[in-house]
Structure formats: C-alpha cells, structure tokens
Image (tube, rainbow, N blue to C red):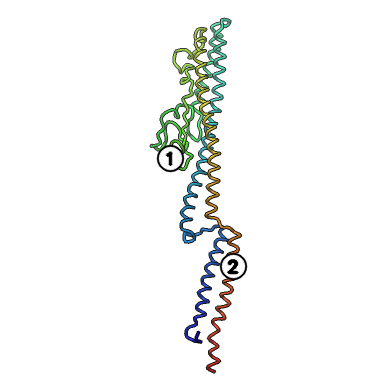
C-alpha cells in the first residue's frame, strides 16, 4: 500500500470498525440496564410482535383471575345471606309445628303467628338488602335472561374470565332466583293461601308443606351457588397456571440472558478500546511521510 497523505485508508477502516464495536457496546449496555433483550423493534421485529401478543394475553388472564375471584366473593355474600334466610325458614317451620298442635288457644296462636310474620318480613328485608358492589343478589334481579346491551346489565350475572368471547370457554352465568318471602310462598306477602299465616290450626298444618318446599327451593339456590363457586375456584387455578406459563414463554423471548449479554458487553468493550487505540495509531501513520520530505 502506498504511503499517502490525503487519504488515510487505515484510519478510515479503524474508524468504521470503531463505529461498529461502539454500536454493539451501546446495544449491550441498553439491554443490561433495562433487563430486556428486545428494547426496540429493530432488536427483533418478529420477537417483539410475538411478545406484545403474549403480554396482552398475560394482562387479560390476570384480569380474568381478578374477575373470577370477585365472582367468588359475590357468591359467598349471597350464600351467607341465604344461610340466614335458612335459619328463618327453619324457625318458621318450628312455629308452624307449634301452632299445629291443639294444646294452644287462639290468642296464643296469634302470638305465635306474629313471630311467624316477623320472620317472613326479615326474610324479605334480607333478600332486598343483600348486594355486592351495588348489585342486588336475592331480590330476583339476577334470575332473568342476561342482557349487556344497556349501561346496566340485566338478568343473569355474566362472569368473564377468558381472553376471548366463547361461551363454552370464557365466561359463566350466575343465576339467583328471587328469595323474598313472597317468592318462597310464606308470610302475608304470599297472599291468603297456605303458608301465609299460622293463626289457626288448619292454616298452620297447611303451612308445613309450603315451608318444606321453601326450604328446598332455597337449598337448590345454595347448592347451585356452591357448585359454581367450586368451578370458579378451579378456573382461578387453571388461569394462574396458564398465566404463569405464558409469562415464562414471554420472558424467554423478551428478557436478556445477563450472563451471555455480559460476555458480549466485555467483548464489545475490549473491541471498542482496541479500535480507539488503533485509530490513534492509524492517524499518526501519515507523519511517516515527513521523514521522506525532510
């Protein structure tokens, strides 16, 4: 190679190598400081696209877990209130049994009936006042067909936990029938038929079957809620496993391997330092021409 002054090709080559090494060093520094292998689209365009889809699924799964847990809390609230209603119905049947026997006179039966009516009123109060996050649970609002077209949903309560919108995979419905005293057929609110009053021996005897059916109806509601709670608890477990594994896959794509990247960082650092040193040497080479001139 000729000894020239105007064009220092060795310095240009060293500068190019320095730029390449310095760029690689900058990339290693960015990855190590952020903990991410992909910090911008140019790092891995395909990997970034897959990562963002996985991140969307992870966020949806985590929200689905929260949705399912909220539904479990709602079911537990309803079941707790139904447990109190259960106690009231049992007491009402006990009172009906008491009024059915002939050892009480009419005045005593009226006193017994007053407690019977108080129990019925309390059942209705509990059913109308039990709510979760402003959603009334036992007054029949959750017994119709679900519709989410309006600002406030009506009918069955829809619990959405999946990442899609498939009825067989992504959501359940919670249906709770009306649990007021009138809906169960007991108390004065139920009309004048059997179960409305136990003020006479005949009415008390006729109320026994009605109360038995009311207890069965209430037990069916509780059994349905219990079965759905078990399903939701299993759903939460599956969603947690799914989210964990998707997170693991996303980590393999997105996160930096610190050991490997640190090796690259040291290599790029040495290459950069070497390039800087050789560029300094290459810049001094044209001075050799002075010895020929002078």
Give how far across and how far down residue 143 sits, in percent.
44, 28
At 53% from the left and 64% from the top, the residue drawn is: 27
- The image quarter in which residue 192 lies: top left
Looking at the image, the residue that sits furthest to the left is: 149
Of the two numbered discs 1 and 2 in the rendering, the one whose residue sits closer to the viewer: 2
Residue 60 to residue 145: above or below: below
Write down the residue under mark 1: 165
Disc on res. 281: none
- Quarter of the figure with the C terminus: bottom right
What is the count of numbered marks?
Answer: 2
Say whether disc 1 or disc 2 marks the residue closer to the N-terminus.
1
Helix, strand or loop status at disc 2? helix
Residue placed at 53% from the left, 55% from the top?
A: 254
Badge 2 is on which residue? 267
Q: Residue at x 57, y 10 (%)?
A: 98
Point out residue 163 in the picture as x, y percentages from the top left corner. Answer: 46, 43
Residue found 53% across the figure and 41% down from its top = 239
Kind of element beneath mark 1: loop
């Amino acid at each position: 190679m000729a000894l020239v002054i105007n064009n220092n090709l060795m310095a240009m080559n060293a500068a190019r190598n320095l730029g390449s090494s310095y760029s690689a060093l900058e990339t290693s520094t960015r990855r190590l400081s952020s903990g991410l292998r992909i910090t911008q689209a140019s790092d891995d365009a395909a990997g970034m696209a897959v990562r963002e889809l996985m991140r969307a699924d992870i966020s949806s799964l985590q929200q689905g877990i929260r949705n399912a847990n909220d539904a479990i809390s709602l079911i537990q609230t309803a079941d707790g209130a139904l447990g109190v209603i259960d106690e009231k119905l049992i007491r009402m049947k006990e009172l009906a049994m008491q009024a059915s026997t002939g050892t009480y006179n009419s005045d005593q039966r009226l006193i017994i009936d007053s407690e019977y009516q108080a129990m019925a009123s309390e059942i209705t109060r509990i059913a109308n006042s039990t709510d979760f996050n402003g959603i009334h649970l036992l007054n029949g609002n959750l017994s119709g067909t679900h519709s989410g077209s309006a600002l406030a949903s009506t009918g069955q309560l829809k619990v959405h936990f999946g990442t899609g919108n498939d009825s067989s995979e992504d959501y359940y419905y919670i249906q709770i029938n009306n649990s007021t005293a009138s809906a169960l057929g007991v108390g004065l609110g139920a009309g004048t038929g059997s179960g409305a009053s136990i003020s006479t021996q005949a009415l008390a005897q006729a109320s026994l079957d009605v109360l038995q059916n009311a207890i069965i109806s209430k037990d069916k509601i509780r059994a349905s809620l219990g079965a759905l709670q078990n399903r939701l608890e299993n759903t939460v477990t599956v969603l947690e496993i799914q989210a964990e594994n998707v997170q693991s896959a996303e980590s393999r794509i997105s996160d930096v391997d610190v050991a490997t990247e640190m090796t690259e960082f040291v290599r790029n650092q040495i290459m950069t330092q070497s390039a800087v040193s050789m560029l300094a040497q290459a810049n001094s080479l044209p001075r050799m021409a002075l010895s020929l001139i002078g």
